[in-house]
Every structure is written in C-alpha cells, then in structure tokens.
Image: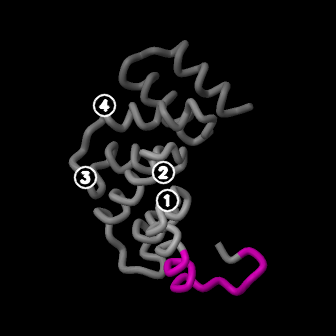
Amino acid sequence: MGAGVVMDEDEAAKLFTQASEQGAALGQYQLGQCYSNGMGVKQNDEKATWLYRLAAEQGEAGAQSHLATCYELGRGVVQDLPKALQLYAQAAEQGLAHAQVCLGLHLAGLTHRFVDAAGYFRLAAD
C-alpha cells in the first residue's frame, strides 16, 4: 500500500471497504489485512477472519493462506489444524510460496511425510 502516493491507511481501508462491499475478492482480502493489523480500522481478528473467508471462497490464494493461519493459531476462529492444512493446500495449489512452505513444514513435522514436504519446499523455491 502507498506505492507512488502518500500512504494513508484510513483512505486505503475506505477504498478496500468499497471494493469488499462490491464482492471483490482482492478488496475483501486487503480489508481483512487492515482489520488483522489495525491499519485504518480498529484491529479485529473476527472481522479479518470473516473477510478472509469471503475472499478465500472466491479462490483468492492470499486469503486462503491467511485464513489457514487464523485456523492454525486460533486467531478469530476456533483453532482447527485440519482446516488450516486444507486451506494451505488450496493456496499452495495456486502457487503461493508462503502456503507451500507452511504446508511442507506441517507435512514434515506432523505426519513425517518428508518426501511430500520436500516437494512443496521445491515448489516454493522455484
């Protein structure tokens, strides 16, 4: 945010709200980021998670990955590791490197599926 213009968190949140209200997945995801980090709006994990979910349901990979983190940590939702892994997998399939790394770490650490984990690490490195 703020590339080429003076950074204004309040204005960014306002514009993301407008995009979100029109059903734009990227606007929902970015507004979720605002709520998650308290940028231009009061920090609110529940609202951030709700917005991530709206965007994730439309296939927005960044939102899927951030929603996965919410489920992994129990941030704004009840902790649910299987749901987190499902969401990381959805984002990883779209090529999101962060999700590929997170999924690889979980596969290696939780299930000892080291070959599968290495595959996700290779994808993330490419």
What amino acid type should be assigned to the residue bearing mark 3? Val
Label 1's element?
A: helix
Quarter of the N terminus within the rendering: bottom right
Query: Which badge, 4 or 2, comes first in the chain's sequence?
Result: 2
Which dot, 2 or 3, sits closer to the camera? 2
Tell me how far mark 1 sits from mark 3, CA to CA: 16 Å
Which residue: 61% across, 27% down? 121
The type of residue carrying mark 2 is Ala
Q: What residue type is labelled 1?
A: Tyr
Name the side, left or right, on which 80 lies relative to 32. Answer: left
Does the magenta segment cover residue 100?
A: no
Give the Cα separation between the discs numbered 4 and 2: 17 Å
**Residue occupied by mark 4:** 82
Q: In this view, does 36 lie to the left or right of 120?
A: left
Q: Residue at x 55, y 58 (%)?
A: 26
How is this picture coloured?
one colour
CB contact under 8 Å: marks 4 and 3: no
Sequence-wise, the earlier of marks 4 and 3 is: 3
**Quadrant of the image for the C terminus?**
top right
Q: Which of disc 4 and disc 1 is earlier in sequence?
A: 1
Image location of residue 98, percent across then percent down: 57, 42
Span shown in magenta: 3-15
Q: Nearer the viewer, mark 4 or mark 2?
A: 2
Residue 29 got which mark?
A: 1
| Tag 4 near tag 2, CB within 8 Å | no
Mark 2 or 3, nearer chain start: 2
Q: In x, y percent, where is residue 104?
A: 51, 28
